[in-house]
Image (cartoon, rainbow, N blue to C red):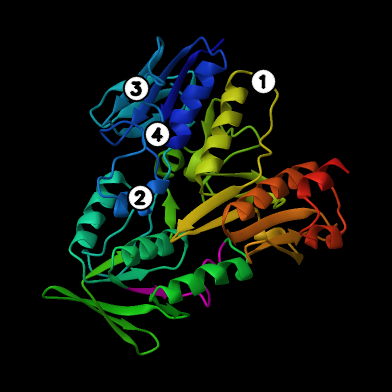
Amino acid sequence: MDNHVVIIGAGEAGARLAHELHTGGWTGSITLLGEEDRPVYERPPLSKNVLVDDRPSPVEPYRDGRLEWPGLTVRTGVTAQSINRTDRTVRLADGEEIPYDRLVIATGARSRRLPDLAVGVRTLRTWDEALRLRSVLDAGGSLLVIGAGLIGLEVAASARSRGLAVSVVEMRPRALERAVPEPAAEVVVQRHLAEGVSLHLGTTVESLEEREGGWLARLSDGTEVVADAVVAAVGSVPETALAKAAGLHVDDGIVVDGQMRTSDEHVWAIGDCCAGPVDVLGRRARLESWRMAHDQAVTAAAAIRGEDVRHTAIPWFWSDQYDLSLQVAGAAAAASTWVQRPQPDGSTVHLGLDDAGRIVCAAGAGGPRVAKDVRMSERLMTSGKVIDPALLADADIPLKTLLRS
């Protein structure tokens, strides 16, 4: 059996893959390559806990020997420069070549940067960037956030909770438009407004001028916003340069099949850098979330071990803002009708159904009960059951009973 696996990228996806291979009985050798010169850490806390905790520390899930065993080599602070698919080697920036039998690309994504804006605009993707942004928040004052997606609003909530005056500018007509159904997104928006955040929707930053001690932003609607610091949270770009240069199929991410295999049978791709089939959407998509990276790693590990497996995991993500927990499972874009399921605390879980009446999305912002119903809705999605919408809307009927019916 071809038994040397090289993994490019030591984030959640790459590290999880190494762990899954080991715990699944892989007897070959594994080399895990990471660009950042630090232990593997999780990114979701960067826009939340790291910005607000008194003494922030990275969440390092593979401490305590979980990535220490014979046959695994973890190398941090190294950069993969090229892939030779003919010779099956990875060339590092220092010229060293590492042979592989099977290669996994888990290079993630980088923050999208706005053209024509000043170089002093902050972004948030890495631990070091989070610490630099934290030092900005330590100074107090005011913050302008460009982008009202998940990261932008999490940064806004963190900054506001620390007492900064916060303005958010979003080019789309509403916040969280990409992946969150409007009623659930509106709950989050109203909470930001109640906290004093100034939201500018449906407008863009036309110019940004750095002045002594601050910034002046002129918006397309004529508004001027003055801030001490600026953060751009306008999405990400998949890190596909290595794959593209190696001749792999790339289309808004490294294209993979249901086993996370690329157009080369010896190469897989997982995490934020890849685009693969999403059953609930009925098409290929690139999905960025901690859980998706984890689930794709599990699938790829099984495929590398030779198991007959296909990736069928339901997309799921969460966002903590103030005391709200936003939970979304499935894909809002796949829904044609919506059912509202009220919760005892006054919140609502919104259930999206496709044309056949199957649940394809569940979303809500609130407390523990919302999270519970979203998790149970995910199980209903997996089952493919068609359930009477009236039963779904009846809060007195536990969703788990519908799963058994």
Q: Where 275 sits versus 394, above or below?
A: above
Q: Are marks 1 and 2 in contact (CB under 8 Å)?
A: no
Dot 1 corresponds to which residue?
Answer: 307
- Marks 4/3 in contact by CB < 8 Å: the verdict is no
* Total residue callouts: 4
Label 1 or label 2, whichever lies nearer to me, is 2
Left or right: where 310 falls relative to 185 = right
Q: Which residue is mark 2?
A: 49
Mark 1 secondary-structure assignment: loop
Seen as rendered, the residue at the extreme bottom is 222
Residue 345 drawn at (x, y percent): 62, 62
> Please, what secondary structure does the residue beneath circle 4 have?
loop
Other-residue count near label 1 (Cα within 10 Å), few / some / many at <14 / 14–19 / ≥20:
few
Pointers 4 and 1 in contact (CB under 8 A)?
A: no
Q: Nearer the viewer, mark 3 or mark 2?
A: 2
Query: Which picture quadrant has residue 32?
Result: top left
Q: Main secondary structure of the magenta part?
A: loop
Q: In this orientation, does residue 18 appear?
A: yes
Magenta range: 166-178
Element at label 2: helix
* Residue 119 location (% of width, % of height): 22, 64
Image quarter in which the C terminus is found: top right
Front residue of 318 and 24: 318
Q: Amino acid type of disc 4?
A: Gly
Residue at 37%, 16% in the rendered image? 68
The residue identified by callout 4 is 9
Gap between marks 1 and 3 measured at Cα: 25 Å
Residue tagged 3: 74
Q: Please determine whether, in this image, residue 283 is positioned above or below residue 89.
A: below
Residue at 54% of width from left, 58% of height from top?
A: 326
The tag earlier along the polypeptide, 1 or 2, is 2
